[in-house]
Amino acid sequence: MKWNLPNILTVLRLLAAPGLAVMFLYFTRPYADWFALILFLSAAITDWFDGYLARAWQQETKIGAMMDPIADKAMVVIALMILVGYSAEHWTPWLVLPATVILFREVFVSGLREYLGDTAGTLKVTKLAKWKTTAQMVAIAVLFSQGIFEHYFVMGTFGMDPDLIDQALTGQIEDVNHLRWHLEGMFWSGRIGLWLLWIAAALTLITGYDYLRKAMPHLKES
């Protein structure tokens, strides 16, 4: 393997993927959410930089081209696994379906590429697929921030009961601006994150169908 800067960034992004899960094994929340969000955003930024630098410096390599999509998929898959596992109960049903669509598509397209072997070049990454990856990463970053709002709220109130939360939201408790800010942040970051994830899932389905359509001529029996 040629150790140029673009390849190093790709390897670091690949290693960051399991690092997301490690954050939740060794840190309590919301610190795990903070560290996971920072790690995820840093990896997402390198996703743009490694490709840009490889083209600008003419340092594109076969190993880099192979590892780049693997690193992207690993980041998305592990992040979705964490979000589904640690999401609040009221978000989980709406999170599972788009997450399932994304995971199924990634496995399906990877299987297509493996089966096609030398002809897998017909399934080159399209511009829409790049937008799909961007939408996935933005949605996941927003959903990680929802976890931060949620657990700062929980830590700051030591497990408020629903009645007390309702009283705070309806203004029956004085000096609740800080509490209200956390609740609103938790609500909107979770809602926006879910919307973005559903958009990403729709793009994922479209690109998956496009890859299947391109692969069909190679799957016909002679």
Image (spheres, rainbow, N blue to C red):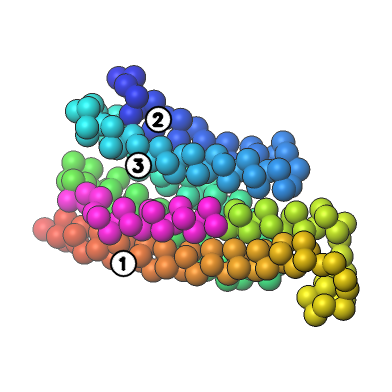
Left or right of 108, for residue 117: left
Residue denoted by label 1: 206
Q: How crowded is mark 2: few (under 14 residues within 10 Å), some or many (20 or more)?
A: many
Earlier sequence position, callout 2 versus callout 3: 2
Query: Where does residue 177 sit, x and y in percent of width and height?
Result: 77, 66
Residue placed under numbered mark 3 in the picture = 48
Position of the N terminus by quadrant: top left
Q: What stretch is highlighted in magenta?
A: 122-142
Quarter containing the C terminus: bottom left
Instruction: Choose between 53 and 18: the one closer to the eye.
Output: 53
Residue 9, disc: 2
Q: Is residue 31 above or below residue 93?
A: above
Task: Give the image location of residue 73, x and y in percent.
Answer: 42, 47
Answer few, some or many: residues within 10 Å of disc 3's Cα (few below 14, many 20 plus, some between 14 and 19).
few
For residue 147, which numbered disc appears in the image? none
List x then y, in percent, for residue 21. Answer: 61, 42
For the residue pair 2 and 137, the one nearer the viewer reads as 137
Q: Distance between the residues labelled 1 and 3?
A: 22 Å
Three-letter residue code for mark 1: Ile
Q: Is residue 131 above or below residue 39?
A: below
Residue 154 covered by magenta stretch: no
Query: Residue placed at 57% from the left, 41% from the top?
Result: 38
Residue 188 higher or lower than 67, as above or below:
below
* Residue depicted at x 39% and y 33%: 10
